Image (cartoon, grey):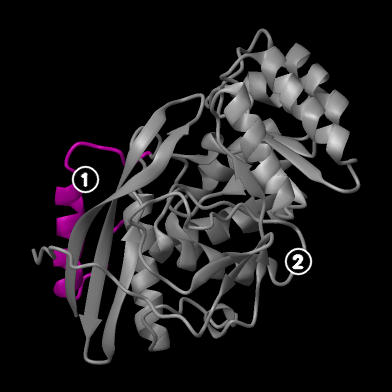
């Protein structure tokens, strides 16, 4: 096997704002594996400022992984989930003899379309109102709104605007705080948000506060979904201990952040055993990573009508041209379209 990697900078059409940070570019890496049967590419979706593998020397670590693979050695990648995701994706595609097929779900055959939520990024109140209206007009039956950054009263106004147009049985409303609420204020905020029939809220306080989060999960009028709380837990025992201590209603599975394909399957199994719900969310990958995440969602959730948190590929001005397309509130794979990778500077360690 020959392994190589390339760095790529994705550029947002407009700044992507959360309660943590504002992003105008997204750094990512591609890994290319070749053997006598063919070639496949996976995406190592490094997430600066969030991933546990945002470490000095990330590129050097990726080079070492590629060197090991070229020498027939499977490296230990448990502590670098984004690299593990890219490598596992490329290996799976080689195994299936198709550079874009991760599993046999039928996704790349265009047989499955995945229901998705419409993500509303933070901005000014006016910008968010416009974005919400665009999602609603596009036919989304589930939208996710980022909260915790523009002013709580303004955010309540946004939710009030949504509920004036659509009743809870017509539109599912998810919220994502990205840890933006103060621990001492969070319960009052959750009580006020619950007036709008919210399906769930992700990560209301910063990760790592197990005792406080367990209390919130127990007392909140809105079901709590854990997101950032999963990042950095790479051993099965640590994952199980966190779930047992906090007891959330849901966990959000992001393969680039939660251990690649293998780690995500592991999280899903542990959650299922405890009666904890889950869904998969992409983490700002390009179309290459999104294709793999979508296939994993098909594998784990089948043709469930429960909306997944999959992106649409429309955030970037220079995304990878692919067959992935949004049709109403579904993500689909259009077999009449082709992949077109840009010219990349491949590094061969």
In the drawing, does residue 263 fall left or right of residue 120? left
- Relative to residue 168, is residue 14 drawn left or right? left
* Residue drawn 42% across the image and 38% down it: 14
Residue in the picture at 34% in, 72% down: 90
For this orientation, the residue located farthest to the left is 349
The residue nearer to you, when weighing 173 against 166, is: 166
Residue 78 appears in view: no
Counting the numbered discs, the total is 2
Please report the bounds of the magenta region as a residue range. 52-77
Residue picked out by circle 2: 304
- Location of residue 81 with respect to 189 vertically, above or below: below
Tag in front: 2 or 1? 2
Q: Which quarter of the picture shows residue 99?
A: bottom left
**Vertical arrangement, residue 300 with respect to residue 180, above or below:** below
- SS for tag 1? helix
Give percent across and percent down for residue 65.
21, 60
Q: Is residue 203 magenta?
A: no
Does residue 236 lie above or below 349 as drawn?
A: above
**Where is mark 1, residue-wise?**
58
Query: What SS does tag 2 mark?
Result: loop
Coordinates of residue 199 in the picture (x, y in percent): 79, 39
Residue pictured at 67% horizontal, 47% vertical: 135
Q: Residue furthest bottom?
A: 37
Indicate left or right for 55 with 298 as reference: left
Residue 273 % position (x, y): 72, 54
Residue 166 makes an appearance in the image: yes
């Amino acid at each position: 096997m020959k392994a190589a990697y390339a760095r790529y900078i994705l550029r947002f059409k407009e700044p992507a704002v959360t309660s943590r940070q504002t992003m105008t570019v997204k750094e990512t890496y591609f890994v290319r594996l070749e053997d006598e049967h063919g070639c496949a590419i996976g995406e190592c979706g490094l997430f600066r400022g969030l991933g546990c593998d945002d470490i000095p020397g990330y590129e050097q670590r990726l080079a070492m992984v590629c060197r090991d693979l070229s020498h027939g050695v499977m490296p230990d990648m448990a502590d670098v989930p984004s690299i593990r995701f890219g490598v596992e994706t490329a290996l799976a595609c080689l195994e299936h003899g198709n550079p874009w097929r991760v599993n046999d779900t039928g996704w790349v055959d265009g047989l499955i379309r995945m229901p998705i939520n419409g993500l509303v990024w933070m901005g000014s109140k006016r910008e968010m109102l416009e974005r919400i209206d665009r999602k609603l007009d596009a036919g989304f039956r589930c939208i996710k709104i980022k909260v915790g950054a523009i002013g709580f009263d303004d955010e309540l106004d946004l939710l009030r605007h949504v509920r004036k147009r659509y009743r809870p049985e017509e539109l599912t409303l998810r919220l994502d705080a990205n840890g933006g609420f103060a621990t001492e204020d969070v319960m009052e905020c959750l009580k006020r948000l619950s007036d709008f029939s919210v399906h769930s809220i992700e990560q209301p306080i910063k990760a790592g506060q197990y005792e406080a989060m367990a209390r919130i999960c127990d007392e909140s009028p809105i079901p709590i979904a854990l997101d950032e709380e999963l990042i950095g837990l790479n051993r099965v025992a640590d994952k199980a201990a966190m779930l047992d201590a906090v007891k959330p209603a849901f966990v959000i599975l992001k393969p680039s952040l939660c251990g690649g394909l293998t780690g995500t399957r592991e999280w899903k199994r542990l959650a299922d055993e405890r009666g904890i719900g889950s869904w998969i969310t992409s983490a700002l990958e390009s179309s290459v990573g999104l294709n793999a995440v979508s296939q994993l969602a098909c594998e784990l959730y089948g043709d469930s009508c429960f909306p997944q948190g999959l992106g649409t590929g429309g955030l970037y001005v220079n995304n990878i041209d692919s067959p992935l397309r949004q049709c109403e509130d579904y993500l689909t794979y259009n077999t009449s379209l082709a992949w077109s990778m840009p010219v990349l500077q491949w590094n061969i360690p």
